[in-house]
Amino acid sequence: MKKPVVGIPAVKIEVFTPEQAGEVRQFVLGVLKEEGFGYDSVKDFDLEDIYGYYIENGGVFYIGTIDGVAVGTCAVRRINSKKCEIKRIYVNREFRGRGFGEELFLKALKFARTNYHVVTLKTDRTLIEAINLYQKHGFSVVNENDDTLFFIYHP
């Protein structure tokens, strides 16, 4: 974990608990709304049962907090016994650019490397900083579909 910079609080990364469901759902939907996306019952159904969808299924869902308030999330979803997907990488707008997103991503990547043989993720092609982060850590683009890039990593 990075040392905190003077004046910038450290983010505390914890595994999601069912008691945090409402707060986390509200946080994720709030970040999506800021980016111009509304709730989509097809894409966002996992937010109805985060614990069941991620943790009980062999994955993990991390929450980054500062002073007990959610400022970021990142998750690993089990696809099968050998393959997983990193997703739900979100950081509150006012906390971006401070390394919190990378911290969350690396925590999820460590979990994925430990438990799976293949790690995937996808992102919008306009998210250049995210794309650079993924490539910096060994991910390669394997497919493109409209504005979405699909990445793969073999630990």
Image (tube, helix red, strand yellow):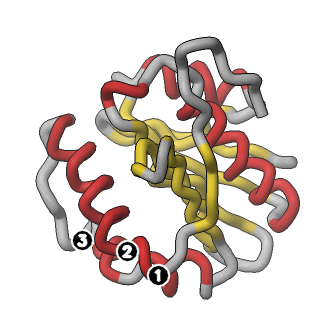
Q: Secondary structure at mark 2?
A: helix
Q: Position of residue 2 (x, y in %)?
A: 75, 26
Is tag 3's residue or tag 2's residue first in the polypeptide sequence? 2
Residues at discs 1 and 2 in contact (Cβ within 8 Å): yes
* Place of residue 8 in the rendered image (x, y in percent of width and height, measured from the top left): 54, 20
Which residue is at the front of the view, 145 or 19?
A: 19
Identify the residue shown where x is 42% and y is 37%. 91
Task: List the residue tagged with mark 3.
Answer: 42
Label 1 SS: helix
Along the horizontal axis of the image, is 27 left or right of 15? left
**Closer to the observer: label 3 or label 2?**
2
Which amino acid, by three-letter code, is at mark 1? Pro
What's under tag 3, amino acid-wise? Val
Identity of the residue drawn at 55% across and 28% down: 9
Helix, strand or loop at mark 3: loop
Mark 3 vs 1, N-terminal side: 1
Mark 1 → mark 2, Cα distance in angstroms = 5 Å
Tell me the number on the disc at residue 21.
2
Identify which residue is drawn at 63% across, 50% down. 13
- Label 2 neighbour load within 10 Å: few <14, some 14-19, many 20+: some
Can you tell which of label 3 and label 1 is closer to the viewer? Answer: 1
Check if mark 3's residue and mark 2's residue have beta carbons within 8 Å: no
Image height of 129 relative to 20, above or below:
above
Q: In the figure, 91 relative to 14: above or below?
A: above
